[in-house]
Amino acid sequence: MLNIILLGPPGAGKGTQAARLQANRGMIQLSTGDMLREAVAAGTPVGLKAKAIMERGELVSDAIVSALIGERLDASAGKGAIFDGFPRTGHQAEALEILLAQRGRKLDYVIELAVDEEALVTRITGRFTCAKCGAGYHDTFRPTKVEGVCDVCGSTEFKRRPDDNEQTVRTRMEEYRAKTAPILPYYERKGLVHRVDGMAGVDEVGAAIDAILDGGA
Ligand code: ADP
Ligand code: ADP
Ligand code: ZN
């Protein structure tokens, strides 16, 4: 049972690869972004606090996101977890270590998706998802097979995130550079980091991740 972190800036492909691992390996995707968007949609106290922060592209508090992960972590017991978009700060990395240790679990890999920044804007502004099943697409890089119809569930309703605009993306990249990238050396010292070329195609990136998890790379 593997517990892994997918680390990379907004648009690097974390959600896409997490969904793939969940489908192929029965691991559980734990995305704090998805959890926060659910909280916003449901109008919970957490959602009310997070909404404006997310719209600005800034980070929600460590306490909130660490609590969300704590609530959902047990769902991945015995299956393995893919942490997608968490941790994003040093405090969150510490919180994760404690949450895992309390359950007799540990991190196996930190997979860094390396991408060049200008490509991220194109990826983010073309991103959309199925409104019914959540499957992820891109206008240019990952269109639906039949225009306007979800490959997975056949729905014809799609949505775009309010924070997926160029201006907010710039703020999100700044947050990544300032607060998230600095946690990489911490994991490097533990020998956990594996770097993957996130500019390759979705399937190639997936194959590179598989090679790491299967112990080859
Ligand atoms: P993240 O979760 O890291 O923010 P996503 O997985 O949502 O990123 O990917 C952002 C957008 O880029 C999506 O529209 C997705 O379909 C597309 N995408 C993901 N991986 C690739 C890739 N390797 N090449 C081209 N486009 C990609
Ligand atoms: P991205 O496409 O940037 O990877 P996410 O879906 O992971 O987007 O996150 C969307 C927004 O939700 C972030 O810009 C931030 O406001 C908030 N968020 C998600 N995860 C975290 C986290 N671990 N810590 C703080 N804020 C978070
Ligand atoms: Zn669908």
Image (tube, grey):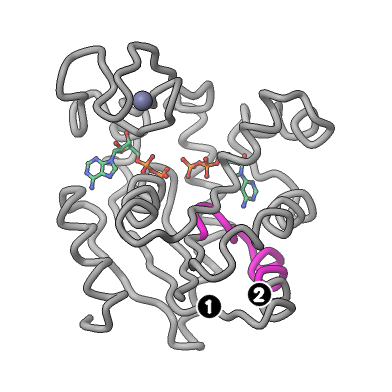
Which residue is more in the foreground, 77 or 128? Answer: 77
Circle 1 — which element? Answer: loop
Membership of 149 in magenta stretch: no
Q: Find residue 119 and report its image quarter.
A: top left
Q: Is 98 located above or below residue 117 in the figure?
A: below
Q: Nearer the viewer, residue 157 or 59?
A: 157
Rendered location of residue 177, percent (x, y) = 50, 55
Residue that mark 2 sits on: 100
Amino acid type of the residue that numbered disc 1 sits on in the rendered structure: Leu
Q: Residues within 10 Å of mark 1 (few under 14, many from 20)?
A: some
Instruction: Report whether 110 appears left or right of 140.
Output: right
Q: Circle 2: is it few (<14), some (14-19), or many (20+) Cα within 10 Å?
A: some
Answer with left or right where residue 45 lies relative to residue 99. Answer: right
Q: Is residue 57 above or below residue 177?
A: above
Image x and y of residue 71, in percent? 73, 54
Q: At 56% across and 62% down in the image, what residue appears?
A: 76
> Range of the magenta residues?
83-97
Rendered view: 17 above or below 138: below
- The residue where tag 1 is placed is 107
* Mark 2–mark 1 CB contact (< 8 Å): yes
- Residue at 18 percent across and 63 percent down: it is 207
